[in-house]
Structure formats: C-alpha cells, structure tokens
Image (cartoon, rainbow, N blue to C red):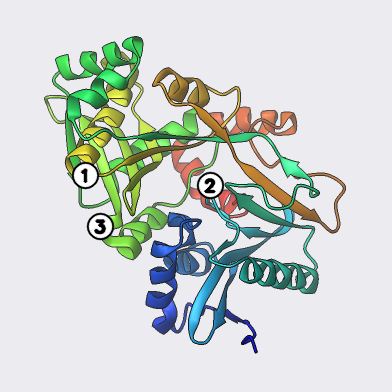
C-alpha cells in the first residue's frame, strides 16, 4: 500500500525545517535559487506579505516544494504568486503526484484567501489550458572553462565595448555591503521612472544568503563607482539580478565591463552557467543581452483567474502607467527612495 503524501507548510518562526527544504532544492533539477527557504523570510520580514511555502512529504522525505506569497494591494490587485520578486517559481518536485498535490493545495489556499488570481512563474509549461503571460523571456548561456574562450564567445561589437572598458582601466571590486550598489541602483531606477526596492532589502539578501549573494562594483582608476550588480549563486550558476549604473558608465563602457568581470570571475570559480535573467521582449535589456550572443527562451507564467477576466499587466510596458513613470522621474530622488518601497512591495 502506497503511503499517502502530506502537504506541510514551512514556518519563518521555526526554521528547523529550512535545511531539509534547501537540501531538496539543491538536489531537485526543477528547482531554482528562488525556491530556497530563505525567501520566506524575505517575503514576510522585509515585504510584510504572508508566505505559504508548501512542501509535500512522504515517509519523512520531501518530494516537492511550492513557495507562494499573498500580495494584496488596492492599486495592483490581490494575488497568490509563486513567487513575487522572482523571475522563476512554480512547483519543483521529484514526482508528478507531489507536483499535482502541491498545486491543488495552492488553488485551495487561493480560494480561501479570495484572491483575484493565482500565478505560477514556470520555466516549463504545466497548464497549457490556463491563461498565460508571454511577455517575458530568460537568457542563459554556458560558461566555458577558459577565460579567453568566454571573451571570444561575445560577439564582435559587444566584445569591443568590453575591451574599451579594460582600456579605460576600470576595476571590479567585491563589496562587503550594499552602500555603493544601492546608490547606483536607486539612481538608475529613478532615471527610468520606476520605484526602487528598499536598501534594507538588499542588506537582508546578503545576510540571508551569505556567500550565495554578492555585490560586484566597477570603479574608474580613481575609485569613482560607475556600475554595480548584486548576483546570486546557485549550484554551478551565477545570476546577475539587480544592477545599477552612473550616468557616466555608458561612455566608459562600465556596464559591459561589469558583466564581463562577473563572467570572468565565475569562470575562475569553475561555474558552468551564466543566467542573464528575465527581460521583456522589445526592451533595451532584451536587445543588450541579444547583443552579447545570448538567445532568449520563453518563460511560462500561468494564471488561474478567479475574480478577473484577463492576465494582469502590472509592468512598465502597460500604457496606463506611462504618466506615473513620467511623474516619478520628476520626483527628487530622496522622495522617490522614500516612497518607492511602499509601491514596489505590492508589485512583486
């Protein structure tokens, strides 16, 4: 007789099951960095959302996990998402019955909470009959074992920009805090008319994930910060996730140099995959990554709709947010940094 699965919920207040959860995530091929247990503390303690980190257990062994969070906003709606602030999510499971049981539990929770919709940010499709968001793609590429092979794999035009940064005597540094990163990041988001995450969130990422979260900052020869990136490390992958640049960075080629330095250092560490992350089709970041020789892979964001008729479009590409974006650019940056966390926590 087959032992039935039990669906349990991880608790941020009792982290005794965190090591078991993370051990499963590290071993499960479907899992990503955003399936790690530490995101529960990010969700609940930084953003003050309710987390529902579910796991399927049988005979004392975890067979699947599904990290979820409830986001409730007057402006952006009421949702249950796997996972807010992450590019990848959805269920990660060793068995299909565990995956099904976790998704069924998620749907039951969604109905109990009365959300407008349930969202799974899948890499691979699972519910082809559900409405889907086809706006996003991801860019991933192999890191070769030799540094020069990685340089030569960058297309000629982009490679010339990297070499320009080297010629300009730019220097990369690993920072022990988020101070220089946040100043560049917040300035960058302000110029683009979008709210910035709170500084304490980035500090919490370094504290929660330790050496698996890292800040690399590029300076000129005189030590002036020009460009910075906060990256995650997962198994044999590096994921540059949050970035920011000074306005002078473009002329000095600091942005391209920054990503080259991250790739070069990842190569030296023996890592195998450079995950350039999510971009919206038709945007500047999409073109930038293509220019580096990365090919897009569609992401499958699937939705179960309860109180809405269409997939939500809570992103800058939505025309109804253009006035807000223009207004945000005109705010003093101190005001924008104060207001930003109150807005962005509800975007997810």
Q: Residue at x 59, y 61 (%)?
A: 91
Specify which label sits upstream in the sequence, 3 or 2: 2
Q: Is residue 298 above or below residue 50?
A: above
Residue 248 or 90: which is nearer the viewer?
90
Left or right of 97, for residue 329: left
The spot of residue 161 in percent (x, y) is 29, 14
In the displayed structure, would residue 181 be above or below residue 285?
A: below
The crowding category of the residue bearing disc 3, from other C-alpha atoms within 10 Å (few below 14, some 14 to 19, many at least 20), is few
- Secondary structure beneath label 3: helix
Residue 19 left/right relative to 94: left
Q: Which mark is residue 270?
A: 1
What's the residue at 12%, 24% (across, down)? 221
Residue 63 image position (x, y, % from top left): 53, 73
Q: At 37% from the left edge and 58% from the top edge, which residue is drawn?
A: 205
Q: Secondary structure at mark 1?
A: loop
Residue 297, quarter of the rendered image: top right
Label 2 Cα neighbours within 10 Å, binned few <14 / some 14-19 / many ≥20 = many
Q: In screen coordinates, is 183 left or right of 265?
A: right
The residue beneath circle 2 is 87
Mark pair 3, 2: CA separation: 21 Å
- Cα distance in 3D space between marks 1 and 3: 15 Å
- Which mark is drawn over residue 211? 3
Q: Residues within 10 Å of mark 1 (few under 14, many from 20)?
A: some
Residue at 71% x, 49% y is 302
* Image quarter (top left, top right, bottom left or bottom right) of the N terminus: bottom right
């Amino acid at each position: 007789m087959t032992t039935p699965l039990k669906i349990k919920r991880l608790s941020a207040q009792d982290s005794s099951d965190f090591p078991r959860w993370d051990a499963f995530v590290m071993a499960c091929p479907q899992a990503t960095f955003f399936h790690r247990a530490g995101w529960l503390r990010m969700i609940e303690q930084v953003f003050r959302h309710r987390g529902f980190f579910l796991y399927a257990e049988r005979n004392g062994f975890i067979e699947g996990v599904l990290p979820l969070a409830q986001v409730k906003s007057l402006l952006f709606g009421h949702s249950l998402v796997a996972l807010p602030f992450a590019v990848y999510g959805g269920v990660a499971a060793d068995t299909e019955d565990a995956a099904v049981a976790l998704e069924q539990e998620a749907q039951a929770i969604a109905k109990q909470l009365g959300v407008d919709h349930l969202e799974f940010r899948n890499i691979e499709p699972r519910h082809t009959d559900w409405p889907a968001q086809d706006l996003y793609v991801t860019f991933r590429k192999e890191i070769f074992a030799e540094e020069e092979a990685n340089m030569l794999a960058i297309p000629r035009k982009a490679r010339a920009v990297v070499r320009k940064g080297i010629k300009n005597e730019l220097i990369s540094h690993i920072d022990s805090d988020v101070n220089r990163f946040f100043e560049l990041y917040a300035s960058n988001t302000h110029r683009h008319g979008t709210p910035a995450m709170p500084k304490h969130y980035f500090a919490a990422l370094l504290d929660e994930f330790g050496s698996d979260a890292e800040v690399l900052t590029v300076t000129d020869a005189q030590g002036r910060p020009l460009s910075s990136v906060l990256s995650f490390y997962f198994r044999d992958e590096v994921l540059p996730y949050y970035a920011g640049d000074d306005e002078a960075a473009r002329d000095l080629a600091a942005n391209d140099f920054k990503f080259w330095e991250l790739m070069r250092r990842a190569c030296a560490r023996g890592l195998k995959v450079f995950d350039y992350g999510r971009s919206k089709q038709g945007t500047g970041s999409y073109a930038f990554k293509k220019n580096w020789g990365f090919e897009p892979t569609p992401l499958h964001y699937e939705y179960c709709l309860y109180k809405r008729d269409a997939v939500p479009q809570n992103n800058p590409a939505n025309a109804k947010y253009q006035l807000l974006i223009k207004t945000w650019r005109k705010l003093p940056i101190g005001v924008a940094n104060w207001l930003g966390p109150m807005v962005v926590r509800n975007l997810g």
